[in-house]
Image: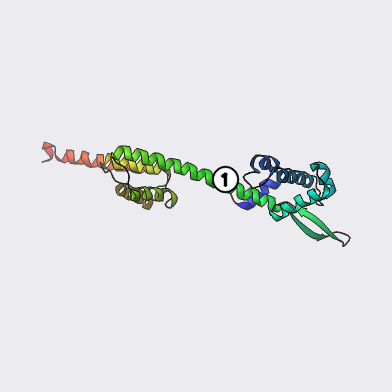
């Protein structure tokens, strides 16, 4: 999902900004006051207001004017709030606020968190495959083998199900090493096999071919064919 689409989702309220701030403000490096201030400013923006009154915020936050003003300044310094000058219909300059910096920070946080989740899931899959291979091989994998395995996920972007099928084929062939598995994966990649269904169909076609060869060989060996 790209940033522009996520920004549209925020503006269309498909991503709840207030809920996101409440649940994630600490991870975003905010304290409670800053998070609450942003929520109040967001509420003001949802009413169609683009002028920020410190007095208005002061009432909502139960803070002194200077404290409230300093808090707004902190948000600007943290690049979560910005002010712009525009010319109104009467030709006068008018200051308005924008929460675009906050929205961009939320998008960045969502993407970072998704990457972290994917990385954790990937690490878990790698660990489980290492444990399985070590059990099947009856030995500990070498650092080189572990690095090769990580490369399958992180650089080659092989699907975990494809990797499992390649391991299964190697074990059936009695090949207890990762280089053999790697050759299988490269072969499948060259054949543009991207899903486990495509691999399964390819393997079945090989079996059908081998079976037809055996039948033809048996027919040639029949007495009346000699």
State the residue at coordinates (77%, 52%). 70
Q: How is the image coloured?
A: rainbow
Left or right of residue 119: residue 212: left
Front-most of 5 and 177? Answer: 177
State the residue at coordinates (55%, 45%). 114
x and y percent of residue 168 in the render? 33, 40
Front-most of 178 and 9? Answer: 178
Residue density around tag 1, few if under 14, some if 14–19, many if 20 or more, within 10 Å: few
Front-most of 106 and 10? Answer: 106
State the residue at coordinates (81%, 50%). 66
- State which quadrant residue 87 falls in: bottom right
- Location of the C terminus by quadrant is top left
Left or right of residue 126: residue 221: left
Left or right of residue 68: residue 188: left
Q: Among all residues in the image, which is located at the extreme right?
A: 90
> Which residue is labeled 1 in the image?
113
Asked whether residue 23 is in view, the answer is yes
Q: Among all residues in the image, which is located at the extreme bottom?
A: 91
Above or below, 90 against 136 in this view is below
x and y percent of residue 216 in the render? 20, 41
């Amino acid at each position: 999902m790209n940033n522009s689409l996520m920004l549209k989702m925020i503006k269309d309220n498909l991503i709840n900004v207030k809920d996101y701030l409440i649940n994630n403000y600490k991870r975003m490096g905010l304290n409670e006051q800053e998070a609450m201030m942003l929520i109040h400013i967001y509420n003001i923006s949802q009413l169609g207001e683009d002028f920020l009154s410190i007095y208005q915020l002061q009432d909502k936050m139960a803070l002194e004017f200077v404290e409230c003003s300093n808090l707004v300044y902190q948000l600007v310094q943290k690049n979560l709030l910005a002010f712009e000058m525009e010319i109104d219909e009467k030709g006068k300059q008018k200051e308005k606020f924008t929460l675009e910096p906050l929205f961009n920070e939320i998008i960045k946080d969502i993407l970072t968190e998704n990457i972290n989740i994917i990385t954790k899931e990937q690490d878990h899959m790698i660990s489980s495959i290492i444990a399985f291979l070590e059990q099947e091989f009856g030995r500990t994998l070498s650092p080189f083998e572990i690095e090769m395995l990580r490369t399958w996920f992180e650089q080659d972007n092989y699907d975990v199900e494809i990797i499992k099928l390649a391991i299964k084929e190697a074990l059936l062939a009695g090949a207890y090493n990762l280089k053999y598995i790697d050759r299988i994966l490269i072969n499948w990649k060259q054949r543009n096999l991207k899903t486990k269904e495509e691999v399964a169909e390819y393997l079945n076609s090989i079996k059908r071919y081998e079976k037809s060869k055996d039948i033809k060989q048996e027919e040639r060996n029949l007495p009346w064919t000699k």
